[in-house]
Amino acid sequence: MSINNVEYAVGKHFLIELINCSAERLKFVNDVSALFLRAAEESQATILHHIFHQFEPVGVSGLILIAESHFSIHTWPEKQYAAAGIFTCGAQMNPQRAIEVIKAGFEAQETRVRIVKRGI
């Protein structure tokens, strides 16, 4: 199998680093899940299922399964940092809108996005 012969992409994976966020916005599952679900909705993603986990004392991991693929998040409030991902194989959703919602909601001072084309 050669990875050099990728003929087409089946989707894009947006790897998102949210830096110097509001630590308060990253601490608790209710806040993080509400923001992430709103980002998925505003991006026009088709939400199928979601699960979020509260770490003790603070921090959250979560996943939203969408028809177009998934959203994922892990927060480190003590570092004012969150790592997120949006993988989409659909053309109807707007990942950029989701990123804007997440950045604003976490009050990130810096956001870095890397886009990886996924395909065979």
Image (tube, helix red, strand yellow):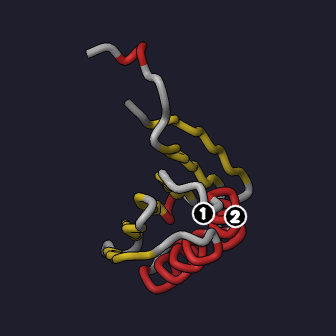
Task: Give amino acid for label 2.
Answer: Arg
Mark 2 residue crowding within 10 angstroms, few (<14) / some (14–19) / many (20+): some
Q: Amino acid at mark 1?
A: Met
Asked if residue 83 shows in the view, the reply is no
Image side of residue 36 versus residue 72, left or right: right
Question: What residue would you read off at disc 2?
Answer: 97
In front of the other: 24 or 93: 93
The secondary structure type at the circle numbered 1 is: loop
Q: Nearer the viewer, residue 42 or 17?
A: 42
Answer with left or right where residue 49 lies relative to residue 104. left
Q: Residue at x 68, y 63 (%)?
A: 103
Residue with the mark numbered 1: 93
Location of the N terminus by quadrant is: top left
Percent from the top left, x then y, of residue 110? 71, 51
**Residue at the location (51% across, 78% down)?**
37
| Residue 50 found in image quarter | bottom left
Circle number at residue 44: none
Looking at the figure, which quarter contains the C terminus? top left
